[in-house]
Amino acid sequence: MIEQLRKDFPLLHTQVDEQTLCYFDSAATTQKPQSVIDAVNKFYQQENANVHRGAHTLSAAATTQYEAVRTKLADFLNVAAKEVVWTKGATDSLNLIAYGLSDKLNKEDIILISPLEHHANIVPWQQAAHRTGARIETLPISPQGILDLEASKQLIKTLQPKILSVCHASNALGNIHDVASLIDIASRCGTITVVDGAQSFLHLRPDLTALGCDFFVFSAHKALGPTGVGGLFGRYELLNDMPVYQTGGEMIERVSFSGTTFRDAPGKFEPGTPNISGVIGFGAALDYLNAIDDSALAHYEQCLYRYLVDALSDIGGVKIWGDIKQNIGVVSFTYKDEHHFDIATFLNTYGVAVRSGHHCTQPLMEHLSLSGTVRVSLAFYNSYQDIDTFIDALKDTIDMLEE
Amino acid sequence: MDITQIQNRLNSLSGWQAKYREIMMLGKKLPALPEALKTPDALVQGCESNVWLHLDLDENQERLVLIADSDTRIVKGLLAIILATYNNLLPHEAKEVDAYELFEEMGLIKHLSPSRGNGVKAIIERIKAQVNAFQ
């Protein structure tokens, strides 16, 4: 099955610097299947028109397609279409939510996040805290960078935060969080729950009704779709209750100089011409994902991950950070005191593309007393051969560094 | 090795592994900066790795003296190349140097395109600014 799927991703078969590409940076952005690329091209070649206006055929067709993807996504996440807002991506979504919920915050309130959050799930809350006087607290994690679930539940009960915002899976370490059990406790405390699903969307395909969160954010490009588009789910009453974030055309009901009224959600959060081709491309990505057996895919990803962790663990001096039991397929490692940049740069000369650095999680790196790690992030289109290539390249790299 | 020797050496090597290995070796030969000189004001902003750079005139107040260090081996190697380029030049000579062109001639520019990762751009900009301040 995997060999067949790999064929759908043209970039996996190209040469980079005369080397066959081993792409291990899917947590940054996934590669795109041909069907997604084709959908974007087809839109511009045959279907291009603006949405939600114009009586002409192309505009009507574009609107139908665009709105159909909203429904498709809602089905994928098991929520209602009117609860889905298109944004530029997870970062944009988190900014919108943090701004939108600010009205509910005052200086007595607590915003609870985890130390494993991406900067995008920290800084917008800091800004909200600056505006409102609310304070930010963090959930407890181990020295290894693993969330302490029981202590976290206890802390939620003790602090009774106004907002809890946590990642479903860590982008830096790959740890999967049992957000459902945190949400369960938080909801009983009247806490508004926000889940950063940027990393979990592809690997865990969350059912948001089962998860029970109030908000969920994601980026299309981390789930086979185009860059520059993503979205959020918001439980309708909460979502529609939030004030508008950005304003302009499209999102209004009626504009006059004596006052303007806005559409209901999701429309009121989508000012201006949206990323139509991006949404349509993402629709093709959802079709692609819906057509494959997701449990078989998840099983394969976990086998690949085990294979990678075992091979890496056999190399003396390598330290793997984070939770290797519950993981979406991300390995963050260091080798002795060697700098992550040197390792990643040498690996690149073998065609192995990894990420190095702090992965936009500086507070986490500080907690781990690291300047950064080398991050190998897997997707279902990776092969065992890719991992063998990586391990061989890493051994050569280590030899070179220790020369 | 002076800059011409470095250039010849790197040009004679084929393949990125060999080139980077050589760059790393150049870095190894560069003396470590004493901890006391790794001051915040010596830190070059805009590099993802730490780069410390001091630039001054020699005791006759004529020629450039540069010392630098980095916590990554490859960037330290790149610093060795940059230092070999600028050290001992008169300020007006240094102004004529195009370090990018040099990296391009060595076939490195494709990999070392201005990025925060290696910080080459930031390092060269810093040197240029300090050289200009001498005149």
Image (cartoon, rainbow, N blue to C red):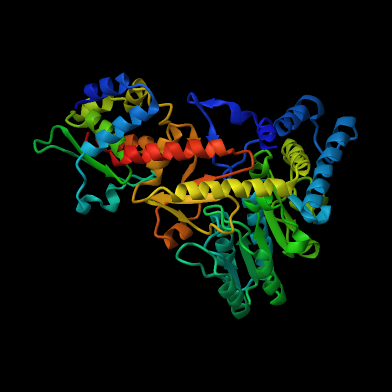
Q: Is residue A342 among what the camera can see? A: yes
The residue at 84%/41% (across/down) is A52
Q: Residue furthest bottom?
A: A158
In this rendering, is residue A140 above or below A327? Answer: below
Q: Position of residue A113 (x, y in %)?
A: 58, 65
The residue at 69%/32% (across/down) is A4
Tell me the quarter of the image containing the N terminus of chain A. top right
Q: Describe residue A114's horizontal placement relative to residue A225 as left or right.
A: left
Nearest to the observer: residue A256 or residue A31 = A31
Nearest to the observer: residue B122 or residue A145 = A145
Q: Position of residue B28 (x, y in %)?
A: 24, 38
The part of the image, by quadrant, that contains residue A126 is bottom right
Tell me the quarter of the image containing the C terminus of chain A. top left
Nearest to the observer: residue B20 or residue A219 = B20
Q: Position of residue A353 (x, y in %)?
A: 50, 37
Q: Is residue A87 among what the camera can see? A: no
Q: Residue furthest left?
A: B60
The part of the image, by quadrant, that contains residue B1 is top left
The part of the image, by quadrant, that contains residue A155 is bottom right
Q: Position of residue B106 (x, y in %)?
A: 34, 22
The residue at 45%/32% (across/down) is A350
Q: Describe residue A83's horizontal placement relative to residue B58 as left or right.
A: right
